[in-house]
Image (cartoon, helix red, strand yellow):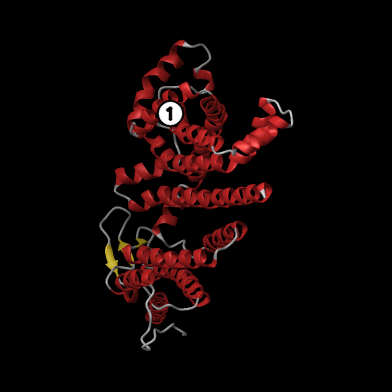
Amino acid sequence: MSARFDKLGSPRFDKLGVVIAAIDAYAAFAAPFATFRANRIVPGQARSILEALPLTLGSLLLAILIAGGVVALLRTPLILRLAASVIALFALALLIGIAGSFLTPDGNTFARVAPASGFWLLVFAFTLLLADVLTRLNLTPAARVGVLAVAALAVGALLFSGSWDSLSILKEYASRADGFWSEGLKHVTLALGSLAAAVVVGVPLGVLCHRVERLRDGVLNVLNIIQTIPSIALFGLLIAPLGWIATHVPGAAAIGIRGIGTAPAFVALFLYSLLPVVANTVVGLAGVPRAANDAARGMGMTDRQRLLDVEFPLAFPVILTGIRIVLVQNIGLATIAALIGGGGFGVFVFQGIGQTAMDLVLLGAVPTVALAFAAAIILDAIIEMTSTRRRTDSE
């Protein structure tokens, strides 16, 4: 291991590495690695790494974690930090599945083994190390998306291999497989559908606010007020008017408009989405250089041609930033839709809370977080690529 030393010969410490090493040490030696429960709802019994795994594998994992903590602590080369983070994460992912098989008695279908706080802290620590390395490597947008794809393929391989089948979250999935994908489709449909509606309405509204200054403050203030309403309250406020529409407007109920269900969830997410889309459209158009507009006028372009051929292309990265905010926001907020019958991954979250079954909560929460994380990385890459192309075109 080649660490960097200061002028006096003492090893130099990495500031973020100090935090990562501290988390690593606590999680490896003081926090439980896995939890064993006789069934899905009784309190769990904590197990350390050496208790949750066969002695050889437990000792190997501790050695990997100690080495990874030292690599993170010292100012080591990036390639070594990258290798340490990847090896540690791979070992954690593989061995937590082995812990599930090791702790579950043979033939026992009621016992549940779940990752405990130590496991999640270790995943967080080495994911933080990996993210720090990737940031320092200054990867291109395409490379970042490639890293995400590799990570997704690795997780998919572990899932399809059956390595995690003994874990409680996969046992919850096994009994709800059809419902999981059905609710997942509803979740994605709500998030993307409300985003699409917000773009269709919000972008023209942002153009109008940009062109008509007297309208701008009023519209943005109203949208700001909507944004401050708690999601549960907004869902509740929409039940009565949508219920009235379903009852009194012919054909409304036939197309799915009801007081509870998907309709109020969709409308609420749409309303929450408007502010980022409208505001970023206004900011993006306001940031178009005056020289570009003057040149377009000098070429004889009409207002419509200037908007579509000059202003929109230059403002697109800023508008896309608003769309990114909305998509990540909606993926999270769609979880709350389950409270009013809107479906989505929130169904499992609230069922788990009601049954005191935390693994069922995770069955809804983990894919929601994964979707939001993936959406953020992909859209960030697209934004950076469009911004780079804009700078190149302007030069």
Is label 1 in a helix, a strand or a loop?
helix
Number of marks in the rendered image: 1
Identify which residue, 79 or 341, lies in the foreground. 79
Residue 207: image x %, image y %?
Answer: 56, 28
Image quadrant where residue 319 sits: top right
- State the residue at coordinates (47%, 85%): 2
Identify which residue, 44 or 24, lies in the foreground. 24
Compared to residue 31, the image places residue 333 above or below, namely above
Identify which residue, 239 or 26, lies in the foreground. 26
Residue 210: image x %, image y %?
Answer: 53, 28
Report whether residue 312 is seen.
Answer: no
Identity, as a three-letter code, of the amino acid under mark 1: Leu
Residue 80: image x %, image y %?
Answer: 50, 77
Circle 1 is placed at which residue position? 220
- State the residue at coordinates (42%, 43%): 332
Identify which residue, 141 or 8, lies in the foreground. 8
